[in-house]
């Protein structure tokens, strides 16, 4: 009977450790998701734009095919701009990230009498992250 209780104690101890480890893992996953919520929504929007553009190009007929191509080209330009073009040259790219990407776009006329843009990322609650804003 003593060995049965020891075995039961060991099983309870192992279950407690496993449960605690599982809580730590799920807490880490929750923390990661909370920290990257804007990126997750941005990536989801990017994926949906690509899927919609593909559908419009492949199945859109004469009217929707050009719209699909414009969406794909615009998304490609933004990807190229963000990954390969130095930020001081972004002012020559006329397409900007907007609400579909989780950004707010603002424009103003600068002292040089040119139009300038600010791409401001949004937090999941809708507030703006001014510290991560990109001034173009």
Image: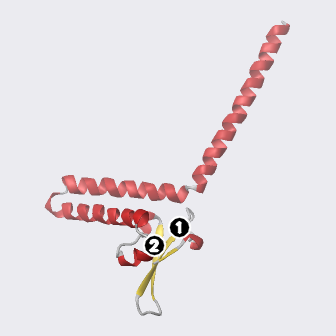
Residue furthest to the left: 62
For the point 57% across and 51% down, the residue is 33
Upstream in the sequence, badge 1 or badge 2?
2
Q: Name the residue under label 1.
A: 122
Q: Please state the horizontal and vertical placement of residue 38, each as a whole percent of the image.
A: 52, 60
For the point 80% across and 19% down, the residue is 9
Q: Name the residue under label 2.
A: 87
Question: What is the secondary structure assignment of the residue under circle 1?
Answer: loop
Q: Nearer the viewer, residue 43 or 90?
A: 90
Q: Please state the horizontal and vertical placement of residue 52, each as a whole percent of the image.
A: 30, 56
Locate residue 120 relative to residue 31 in the image: left or right: left
For the point 39% across and 72% down, the residue is 96
Q: Please state the horizontal and vertical placement of residue 95, each as a whole percent of the image.
A: 35, 73
Residue furthest to the top: 1
Task: Judge whether 58 appears above or below 98 on screen.
Answer: above
Locate residue 27 relative to residue 78 in the image: left or right: right
The picture quadrant where one finds residue 47 is bottom left
Task: Judge whether 30 appears above or below 91 on screen.
Answer: above
Quadrant that contains the C terminus: bottom left
Label 1 and label 2: CA atoms lie apart by 20 Å
Crowding at dot 2, Cα within 10 Å, few <14 / some 14-19 / many 20+, comes out as: few
The picture quadrant where one finds residue 113 is bottom left
Q: Which of marks 1 and 2 is in front?
A: 2
Task: Judge whether 118 appears above or below 9 on screen.
Answer: below
Q: Please state the horizontal and vertical placement of residue 77, each as a whole percent of the image.
A: 33, 66
For the point 33% across and 62% down, the residue is 76
Quadrant that contains the N terminus: top right
Question: What is the secondary structure assignment of the residue under circle 2?
Answer: helix
- In the rendering, which numbered label is found on residue 12? none
């Amino acid at each position: 009977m003593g060995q049965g209780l020891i075995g039961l104690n060991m099983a309870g101890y192992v279950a407690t450790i496993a449960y605690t480890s599982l809580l730590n893992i799920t807490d880490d996953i929750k923390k990661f998701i909370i920290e990257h919520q804007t990126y997750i929504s941005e990536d989801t929007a990017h994926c949906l734009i690509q899927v919609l553009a593909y559908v419009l190009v492949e199945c859109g007929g004469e009217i929707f095919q050009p719209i699909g191509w414009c969406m794909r080209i615009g998304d490609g330009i933004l990807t190229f701009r963000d990954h390969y073009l130095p930020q001081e040259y972004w002012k020559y790219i006329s397409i900007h990230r907007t609400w579909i990407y989780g950004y707010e776009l603002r424009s103003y006329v600068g002292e040089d009498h040119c139009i300038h843009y600010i791409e401001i990322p949004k937090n999941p609650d809708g507030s703006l992250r001014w510290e991560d804003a990109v001034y173009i």
